[in-house]
Amino acid sequence: MTGIDHNSHQHIDRTETVRIDELAPDFEARSTQGMVRMSDFRGKWLVFFSHPADFTPVCTTEFMAFQNAADRFDALDCKLLGLSVDSLYAHLAWIKDIEARFDTRITFPIVEDISMAVARVYGMIHDGSATTAAVRSVFFIDPDGYVRAIIHYPMNVGRSVDEIVRVLMALQESDANEVATPEGWQPGDETMLPPPIDQTEADRRAGMDGGAWYYTTAGAAR
């Protein structure tokens, strides 16, 4: 389903809330770096994140942290894209103030979403919420345009950019080697085989790594 708000210069192609393993809903909107379209990011990973409001303390710390980690995201072939329901002019004023006060120039685009069309489709504004401010949502979108992971934080708790980088690396490791990553996984740590899907495979794994057929490290299978 398509909805267009001409006043906000937005075009979004559905109204259902996005889920993991679905294509990220496409949209076109104004940003601090001109018009952006979600589908233009195909071919690279994308971390798409919302924040409650410009000129707020926690959001300011987050944006500086994302910017300071820009080289880490670049090394992982990943782009950054921010969004809030503030106007384009508020975004521009805020990032100019961040640069002036904290000597940090924000180099990734921030989407204007005054109509809340994008925020609602992506579930950034929860039904029944007493406020129109977006929660701190993070969407990990793969090079084929599929949403691979979603994290929501409340408005009063700042995100960990280190954890966002870790999740991105874990997704890439899983894709590259067809493995699963255990709790707290970091690059270089052991990975796990996905659970067996038939009895023959379960029997085969029972003789590996201590005989726990459901708990097999990738190293034990080599």
Image (cartoon, helix red, strand yellow):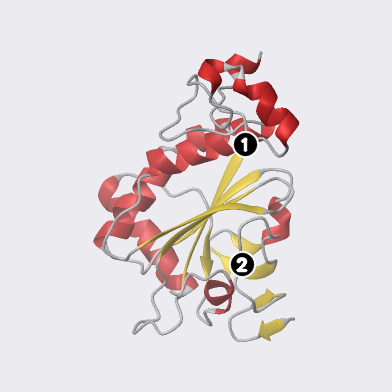
Q: Judge from the rendering whether residue 32 lies leftward or rightward of residue 92; answer left or right.
A: right
Residue under numbered circle 2:
18
Q: Which comes before the other along the chain, label 2 or label 1?
A: 2
Q: Judge from the rendering whether residue 87 lies leftward or rightward of residue 29; answer left or right.
A: left
Image location of residue 122, percent across then percent down: 56, 69
Disc sitting over residue 64 in the figure: none
The one of 17 and 75 positioned closer to us in this rendering: 17
In this orientation, does residue 79 appear?
yes
Residue occupying the point 33% across, 64% down: 154
Image location of residue 22, percent across then percent down: 69, 60
Residue occupying the point 46% across, 36% down: 166
The quadrant of the picture occupied by the C terminus is top right
The one of 132 and 8 positioned closer to us in this rendering: 132
Q: Secondary structure at mark 2?
A: loop
- State the image quarter where residue 79 is shown: top right
Q: Secondary structure at mark 1?
A: loop
Q: Residues within 10 Å of mark 2 (few under 14, many from 20)?
A: some
Image location of residue 192, percent across then percent down: 56, 28
Residue occupying the point 53% across, 40% down: 168
The one of 155 and 28 positioned closer to us in this rendering: 155
The quadrant of the picture occupied by the N terminus is bottom right
Image location of residue 99, percent across then percent down: 34, 50
- State the image quarter where residue 186 is shown: top left
Image marks 2 and 1: residues in contact by CB distance under 8 Å: no
Vertical side of 72 occupied by 9: above or below: below
